[in-house]
Each structure stands twice: as structure tokens, then as C-alpha cells.
Amino acid sequence: MIDLKRNSKKEPVKATGLRARASSSYSPNQKEDFKISRGRFSNFLTCKRCFYLDRVKGLDPPGTPGWTLNETTDLLLKKEFDYCRERQIPHRLFIDNDLSHLVPFDHPEIDEWRDSLHKGLMLRHKKTNIILTGGVDDIWQHKITKKLIIVDYKSQAKFGRVDKEDYLVDPYHEGYKIQMDFYAYLLKGMGFDVDKTSYFLVCNAKRDEEEFNKRMNFDEYL
């Protein structure tokens, strides 16, 4: 059987059903630190048996291609906010939403915190060898209270407007709230003062346009 994942040479690889890296599986009573990402933590809440088979037994779930369009949206948004971060000025969305008291948080480790694959926010769970990690999309700061505000970018393509009141009621979005709580837990554990309010920046592609013409337009909701 061929895996959906490919090796570094873009060649198909045999699906063994097990992960290749031994360090990605937890051995009972091991002394080395073991990282658990935000995604794996969510898996634990969804199905503890599945989490055990994955993290302890090393069963590798089916691989899926990345969301390259969504990743591109995130990348371009980060460029916008980094421009404002360097100058410590409000982003255009802050002004449009009466949030001119906010600025993107400027910190020397912000790029590491946003790197979900290699770094991310990190916190040791109490006195265990478990390291909780999670790559945050962005962090803003209240200029008066100095509290940090967690931000997550969401890209989608649905007809009509995004209802801010019902956005998190959607069953498919329930995990978003846990995601924010997880990031807040990490930041607080790292010694930062975190605001109770967090934001989702939802970019909704317009599907009712007359033509493509090498351009995809979005509505933004905060």
C-alpha cells in the first residue's frame, strides 16, 4: 500500500502504518522530554484511545495534503501585521473595528512562536516531562493594559456573510474555542498577562464573483 505522504525526493513511500521517528512515540516511564502539540491535545479530548494508539503505540494516521491556499492567506496576513509590528502602529482592521488601542505584539521570539512545525509556544506541564507546544498565528497587545491578545486566522469560502454571533456555534468550529484556551494556557504559563478576549480573523472568499481573472477576493470578519 502506498502512503499519501511522500519522501524528501517527492517519491511515493510504502505505507507501514507506523511512524518512522521513534522520538514521536512516548515510552512509559521515559526520562526524556516528550512534546505534545495543540493538535494532538485536541485528539486526546476527542478520543483517548486514538491518542494512545497514536502517541504511545506509534500508529501513523493517514496523511493528507496540506492546505496551500489557506497557508498562503496566513502568510500574506502575517506580512501585513509584521509591517505594523515593526512600526508599532494599528493595523487597518483595528481602525475599521474601533480597536485602535491594539497593536501587533513585538517580541524577539514571535517568529518562533508562530512556527508550529519546529518551535511554537512551549510549556512544561507541571513537574512532568511533557512539553505542551502550539504555533499561534499572531499575538496582539492592548496598549493601555499591556495584556496580550491571542489571534487565529481562518480562511474559508462560503456563500453569504459570516455571522459573528453564530460562528462558534457551528459544530465544525467547536474545537476553535479549545484552540484559543490552549494558547492562552501556554502564554500564561510562560509568564505573560493574557487578555480574556481573543479574536478570529476570518477571511471568506467570495464565491459569487462574475469571473476569476487571476484574482480571488475576500471579505474579512473580526
Image (cartoon, grey):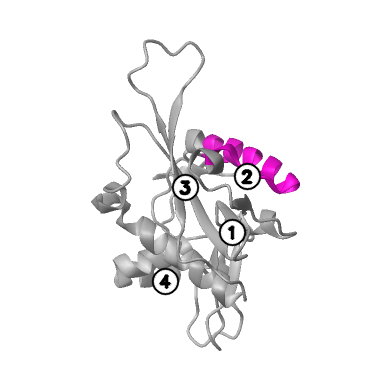
Could you give the CA–CA distance between mark 3 and mark 2, rounded to whole angstroms? 50 Å
- What kind of secondary structure does the magenta stretch mostly adopt? helix
**Residue 53: horizontal and vertical position, in percent?**
37, 69
Mark before the other along the chain sequence, 2 or 1: 2
* Element class at badge 1: strand
**Residue 51: horizontal and vertical position, in percent?**
37, 69
Residue 85 is a magenta residue: yes
Locate residue 176 relative to residue 23 in the image: left or right: left
Looking at the rendered image, the quarter that the C terminus falls into is: top left
Q: Mark 1 points at which residue?
A: 142
Residue 90 is marked as 2
Q: Do the residues labelled 3 and 2 touch (CB within 8 Å)?
A: no
Three-letter amino acid code of the residue under disc 3: Lys
- Discs 4/1, front: 1
Residue 146 is a magenta residue: no
Mark before the other along the chain sequence, 1 or 3: 3
Mark before the other along the chain sequence, 3 or 2: 3
Task: Kindly identify the residue that appears in the image at 47 percent across and 84 percent down.
Answer: 28
- Discs 1/3, front: 1
* Element class at badge 2: loop
**Residue 214: horizontal and vertical position, in percent?**
51, 14
Locate residue 45 relative to residue 40 in the image: left or right: left
Which class describes the residues within 10 Å of circle 2: few (<14), some (14-19), or many (20+)? Answer: some
Three-letter amino acid code of the residue under disc 2: Pro
* Element class at badge 4: loop
Q: What stretch is highlighted in magenta?
A: 71-93
Q: In which quarter of the image is residue 149?
A: bottom right
Q: Name the residue under label 3.
A: 14
Could you give the CA–CA distance between mark 2 and mark 1, rounded to whole angstroms? 11 Å
Q: Can residue 145 be spotted in the picture?
A: yes
Three-letter amino acid code of the residue under disc 4: Lys
